[in-house]
Image: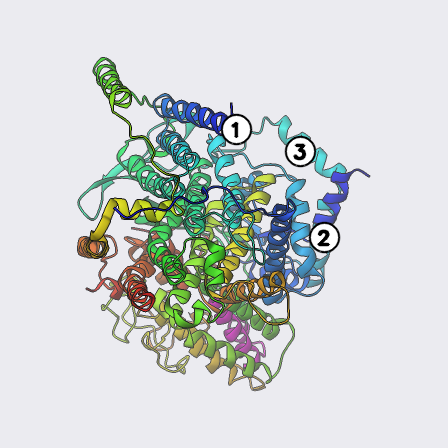
Amino acid sequence: MTAQQVAFWALAVVSVAAGVAVFTVDSMARATLALLVSLVCVGLILLLTGLTYLGVLVILMMVMEMMVMAVFMVMYMMNPGGLMPMKMVHNNGGAMAVAAGVFVLLAGGAFLVPWPVRRGGLPADPTRALGVAVMGPKMLVMMVVGVAILATMVATVVLAVHRGRGDRPGDPEAEP
Amino acid sequence: MGLSERLLRYAAGRPRPLLAGVPHGTRVRLLAEAELTRRGWPAARSPAEADLLVVCGSPGAALAEAVEVVWADMPAPRARADLPGDLPPERVTAALDGAARHLADGRAQRLDVARRTGRSGGDHGQDEDHGSGMGGPGGLEMAGRGPDRDGLALDRLCLPLGPVLPDWPAGLLVETVAQGDVVQEARVEVLGGAGEERFWDEPWLEAARGRSVTRDEAARRTAAAHLDSLGRLLAVAGWDAEASRARRLRDRLLWERAGGEIAGDVTRFTRRVRRSRTLRWMLRGLGTIGPAPGRDGRVRGGAPDGPGTTGDGSAPRGPGTAGGAPGPAGPDRGDVPGRLEGWLARTEAALRGLGDGTRLTGDEGPRGPVGGRPPAASPAAPPVSPVLSVLSVMPGLLAGAELAAARLIIASLDPDLDQAPSSREAARA
Amino acid sequence: MPETPPMTPPMTPPMTPPWTPFALFGALAVLAWGAAALDAALAGGRWPGIVTGPLRGAARELVRQRRRTVMPDVPLVRAGVCALPAAAVLAAVVLPLGERPVADLSVGVVWFNAMEVCVWWALWLTGWGVNSLHPLIGGYRFVAQGLAYELPHMFALITAALGAGSLRVSEIAAAQRGLWFAVWMPVAFAVYLVSAVAMAFWGPMDRPVGSDIAGGVRAELSGPDRLVFEAGRYLLLAVAAAAAVPLFLGGGVGPALPPWLWTALKTVAVLAVLVWARHRLPGVRMDRFTRVSWLVLIPVSLLQLLVVGVVVL
């Protein structure tokens, strides 16, 4: 086995184990951290396949998203501090059936899909190649849409917090 | 001598002291702070960070209990210096030296650890008497739920502030009920200390007793009191550099008998603080004491049925400021920057009296009338102590404030609990 | 679909001498120590206390007990505390020590960003795990701070990358042979400096570990935990300063002196500015800063990005 294969299997095992841990640990903080570990391992596997940009991007996004998710999970769970051990699984039978079904579907897909055969070598800059492949000639449109989405997000938040916790009488910062 | 012994000694050359202030221990606290600055021992922010506990004053039973909790929270190696309120200045240095020696003493520290582990380490959870919680694992108090101001039901928990915190009025305990870091309710208590001394009011009290006190002395005490408050507020606002500058100026005024040349340094300090746009941006709108002032433009400290006036016709304490004219009792009207500006202006005004050798008359201490004698205007009405009116507005100002804002509001009120009657509870909201 | 010419495969890092990781770590340690010493000097400390202070502090934590809180989540605390220096050092591997970094990743800028957001987790886990109120509030304060500074920060990084047409940090540095990016994209540079202070929770942006919440995240740490945390904090500050050099200040480019020395000098200069800012400015709270960050910093950094994009085209 090459070093790459060893790394792949190690990451794959850690990823699955961390995924299992999400449902066996007894606090939201640990569960979210376990999910993060699992997803970071997936990002590292992408790095192994040479998709540097995608791999690092997955790590970056997952670190941030899981952080935000942890905050929300803790907020919604009526278990302040994660002190009371809590069960992470409910409706075991139904969940098992759904999980098995999804697994069979995905695994079947992986085996049945006619995978393309590589033509030529690796591009010099896979990041660029990927961007061109995904967006093609619509690059400008995509960039503008991206900025528009960001502006929408900021505007939505600003409007939403208008009557939020920052809006206290006598607080000039909260004036619109 | 083993490696850890060497490390212990090396580290003991620069301990991190945690100061526990006690009412009527202001003089000792100021002496200790000046000495710690001189030695370059940086103050700790929490018991876990500290290895030297400096108790400034003689705490009463409730405060002593709180100090014991802090002492139990400090990991070994640790040392403790108890400075009673009446300790002569030269003994402060000796007490700190003794504590540093104890810190470097490997044998004593090992004994300390052995003694603590012998007591099964159950040092925690001694102050679990605030209500509104259900029993949780480990005897911990769990958060209950309560309505939020946005109409949601959110977890709420008890968050006691004080009495041992850095940059915190000595003896103050604010029991808050918080949702997240937003204070919903606050209850103020005073944990007293033994003694009678009221350091900041001393010149006026002495003068009222008929002793000869110069105006120079009173001017120093006034400026130093405001610089002490400024140091606290700036430290809580996260401006350590200017906070320590204020404290050094305070120490020079009090202990080094600095003369007229200090006025220039104070002016440079006040100019820097006034010019900081960031500071104004962060402070403005916080802790506004409402538009319901008493007849002389001041708040009657949540005691609207109090006596109509306590004005005794003495000279105003300083130029009128953004925070409204400072007057005899109670905190300045306006917001936190208003009170900050009030302190700055009054410090500058007080410094103009430096070197005035004439005899002090009047009753107007740094925080209002010191109550050395009944006000001339209405001798029948008992004077309201400034500290009581401050403590009574505090809970109302804290409700709805974030923790950072709450700390700033408390620092901007900076009650001097040496003035408070040693009651366990002063106000409730 | 345009043809992509077959070329050398990626992921073959250019050869770097085997001692570079040690040089990187040594340089970061010296910078961190220097930052602590400069901070003490600006706070009015005296020689030699300012230099020995960090060493005495380290010795103190080595012989100290750990503080035991009630029912802590110890694995999470350890993970959080150790993640802080780890994230700082991992972020630094893409920064050139002169001309070559330890690992010259083709997406170095994104890597730097990914490692640096791990600090969010480091602080939140530490604050959460010790099960004490002040650290918990500190941890959440940093998450809020992260949401405030991260978007302008990303746009500043991307602006530098766009100016050079590459995500590789050494190529960004090399693209500034004529003119420093700090000169012709000053807004991005300023935004980077602000966000660097925020990401290192340093100086005016140190409210997550502020003294108003008794030291915040680190309030209950003592012994080795505190040592690792504080070391990580200063390492992160050093890395945040060091990253400004290849991204905006021309990297190792400069007359007469060798590139590594120029890199070191520029890093020290940026670090000194960041340390000085702590003494010059009061604390900045996120309940006020977020508004400015989202309504001012994001639009101006987007405008800067647009200007740079037009110039590059």
From mark 2 to mark 3, how far is it between C-alphas? 21 Å
Mark 1 Cα within 10 Å, few/some/many (few <14, many 20+)? Answer: few
Mark 3 — residue?
B113
| Amino acid type assigned to the residue bearing label 1 in the image | Ala
- Camera-side residue: C305 or C136? C305
For the question of whether residue B83 can be seen, the reply is no
Q: Which element is circle 3 on?
A: helix
User: Based on the displayed image, in which of its 4 quarters is residue B249 positioned?
Assistant: bottom right
**Whether label 2 touches label 1, CB < 8 Å:** no
Rendered image: mark on residue B13: 2
The mark lying in front, picked from 3 and 1, is 1
Rendered image: mark on residue A3: 1
From mark 3 to mark 1, how far is it between C-alphas? 49 Å
How far from the left and from the top, in percent, is residue C276?
53, 67
Q: Is residue A42 above or below residue B280?
A: above
The reply to the same-chain question for discs 2 and 3 is: yes
- Camera-side residue: B41 or C297? C297
